[in-house]
């Protein structure tokens, strides 16, 4: 018969991870991708475009636009990026300056997940059973070990890898969700901090582009607090209600209300979304299921109820919003917390299976990255380089000694980590998450060092804008009706053009040049009053191109350029 409390943890099992190792894991995850690249398609450069426009004075702080196209009321992340561009943009690349605060936000999301798990693990219901003759884990040591496992589980989450390294509003939303979880988790031990966090979380979510989600999450939080048996959580309900009202007020003030409902009503789309779900939340979701099973007699306890309700809420929102990955990302902290509570109940065979899968999968991935790098640099083997050249034509193959050294250091660290884990390290609770987290950090580091040149060339608009610049000189006024915000932001930042994307009719624009997105399969559509100059393909898709026109009326062009 299963015990009502399944956790049996000794003092040796609850040994905390060395702090220097934990910070090295965090740095190895956060820092790669911060340097040496352009903003990427499409959300990354779109958000950066608003930030750069605000910082450079091209648009208003309260109503930012790019090419005349307004934002959707997502102001707080844009303000954060714009402030850093103004502070550091004169010394470093503006794109790097904008990425700095978002690297801090990613770190903050990891730290918040640690503290949420720590406070939940300190609750009485989460504590392991005492041994008959002593030797069980101390409450603080147990909580720290569980929290270390949660942080590693979040680092290991595949879905956070790319989205967590972009300069997009979703990172600010992720931090807001972390603050909300902290408010619920810390209510028993830190009531003052819990109330402050509750008041901050939902308005922050509303100001970061998710007002309806923020209000709905507030309602769920209030219901959870009122239904809880914990008096400390019940006393938090008025503060959550006040935060919900503040979130609604912020959304109204900023004009940010925007319902993005797009439910999955087709079985094929639903099946595809769930396949993506299992990839996106790996390796947390199997551990979450195990947690819910092993702790099934304590679902009403804070350490299970709080992350379960928040995770279920975001999974439901994800389904109602068409299976958008950026919504599902907000569930990852709650998934990581739940996954951590599986660690004290894992059987040795399950832990070994996680280790072997991680060693196999990430070692193969790392070896593949090194083979591709060797092919690019020295031409042996030849086929990978040809494939990369086909997918990302025109990238620079310049050798970078620092990138190679960082890649070698990461690979040696992985070998050392595997050797440590193979050395019969049975006791620390967090041991099963070390290899998944280390493997993700390794692969991200290798991609951001060895393979950054072809990836940046493929994911950036720079090469396309450079080809457009052969026809359109910098500082020109360019009409771009129908272009996406990402392309408009690229034209403004990379091409230094003055873009008019808000005038739907080309003839109504006062610009001298016109850019139209068309398919190469079709002949260029005649544009009365405009002279066709040429067509430029995108990097990876030969079927899409930008058709470039110049105003045929030179007098009108002179007026436009004045």
Image (tube, rainbow, N blue to C red):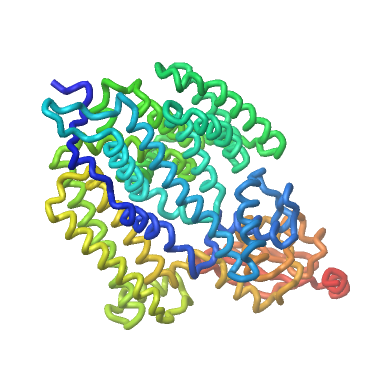
Residue at 35% x, 40% y is 336
Residue at 46% x, 31% y is 190
Is residue 224 at all visible to an observer of this figure? no
User: Is 510 on the left-hand or right-hand side of 112?
Assistant: right
User: Which image quadrant is residue 272 in?
Assistant: top left
Q: Is residue 14 above or below residue 294?
A: below
Residue 311, given in percent of the width and then of the height, sits at 41, 33
Quadrant location of the C terminus? bottom right
Is residue 116 at all visible to an observer of this figure? yes
14 and 289: which one is in front?
14
Residue at 34% x, 27% y is 123
Q: Which residue lies furthest to the bottom in this view?
A: 378
Quadrant location of the N terminus? top left
Residue 331, given in percent of the width and then of the height, sits at 43, 38
Residue 482, given in percent of the width and then of the height, sits at 67, 55
Residue 394, given in percent of the width and then of the height, sits at 48, 77
457 and 356: which one is in front?
356
202 and 365: which one is in front?
202
Residue at 44% x, 72% y is 453
User: Which image quadrant is residue 281 in?
Assistant: top left
User: Is 238 on the left-hand or right-hand side of 491?
Assistant: left
User: Is 255 on the left-hand or right-hand side of 424?
Assistant: right
């Amino acid at each position: 018969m299963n015990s009502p409390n399944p956790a049996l943890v000794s003092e040796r099992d609850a040994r905390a991870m060395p702090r220097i190792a934990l910070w090295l894991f965090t740095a190895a995850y956060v820092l790669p991708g911060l340097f040496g690249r352009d903003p990427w398609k499409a959300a990354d450069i779109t958000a950066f475009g608003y930030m750069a426009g605000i910082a450079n004075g091209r648009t208003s702080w309260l109503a930012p636009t790019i090419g005349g196209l307004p934002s959707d009321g997502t102001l707080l992340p844009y303000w954060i990026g714009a402030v850093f561009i103004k502070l550091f943009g004169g010394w470093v690349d503006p794109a790097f300056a904008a990425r700095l605060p978002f690297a801090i936000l990613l770190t903050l999301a990891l730290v918040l997940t640690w503290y949420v798990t720590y406070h939940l693990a300190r609750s009485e219901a989460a504590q392991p059973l005492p041994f008959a003759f002593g030797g069980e884990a101390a409450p603080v040591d147990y909580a720290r070990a569980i929290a270390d496992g949660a942080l590693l589980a979040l680092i290991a989450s595949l879905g956070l890898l790319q989205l967590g390294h972009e300069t997009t509003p979703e990172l600010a939303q992720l931090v807001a969700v972390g603050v909300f979880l902290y408010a619920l988790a810390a209510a028993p031990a830190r009531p003052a901090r819990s109330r402050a966090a509750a008041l901050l979380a939902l308005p922050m979510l509303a100001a970061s582009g998710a007002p309806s989600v923020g209000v709905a999450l507030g309602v769920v939080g209030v219901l959870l607090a009122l239904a809880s048996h914990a008096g400390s959580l019940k006393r938090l309900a008025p503060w959550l209600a006040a935060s919900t009202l503040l979130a609604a007020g912020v959304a109204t003030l900023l004009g940010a209300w925007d319902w993005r409902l797009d439910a999955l009503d087709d079985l094929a789309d639903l099946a595809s979304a769930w396949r993506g779900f299992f990839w996106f939340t790996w390796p947390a979701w199997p551990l979450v299921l195990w947690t819910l099973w092993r702790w099934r007699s304590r679902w009403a306890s804070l350490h299970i109820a709080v992350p379960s309700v928040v995770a279920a809420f975001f999974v439901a929102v994800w389904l109602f919003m068409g299976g958008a990955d950026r919504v599902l990302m907000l569930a990852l902290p709650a998934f990581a917390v739940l996954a951590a509570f599986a660690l004290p109940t894992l059987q040795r065979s399950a832990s070994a299976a996680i280790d072997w899968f991680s060693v196999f999968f990430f070692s193969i991935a790392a070896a593949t990255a090194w083979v591709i790098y060797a092919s690019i640099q020295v031409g042996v083997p030849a086929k990978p380089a040809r494939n990369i050249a086909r997918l990302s034509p025109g990238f620079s193959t310049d050798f970078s000694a620092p990138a190679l050294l960082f890649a070698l250091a990461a690979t040696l660290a992985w070998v050392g980590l595997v050797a440590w884990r193979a050395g019969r390290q049975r006791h620390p609770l967090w041991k099963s998450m070390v290899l998944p987290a280390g493997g993700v950090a390794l692969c991200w580091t290798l991609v951001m060092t060895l393979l950054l040149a072809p990836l940046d060339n493929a994911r950036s608009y720079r090469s396309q804008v450079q080809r457009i610049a052969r026809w359109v000189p910098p500082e020109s006024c360019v009409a771009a009706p129908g272009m996406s915000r990402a392309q408009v932001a690229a034209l403004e930042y990379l091409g230094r053009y003055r873009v008019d994307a808000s005038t739907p009719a080309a003839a109504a624009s006062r610009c001298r040049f016109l850019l139209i997105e068309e398919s190469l399969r079709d002949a260029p559509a005649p544009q009365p009053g405009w002279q066709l100059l040429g067509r430029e393909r995108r990097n990876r898709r030969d079927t899409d191109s930008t058709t470039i026109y110049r105003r045929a009326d030179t007098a009108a062009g002179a007026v436009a350029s004045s």
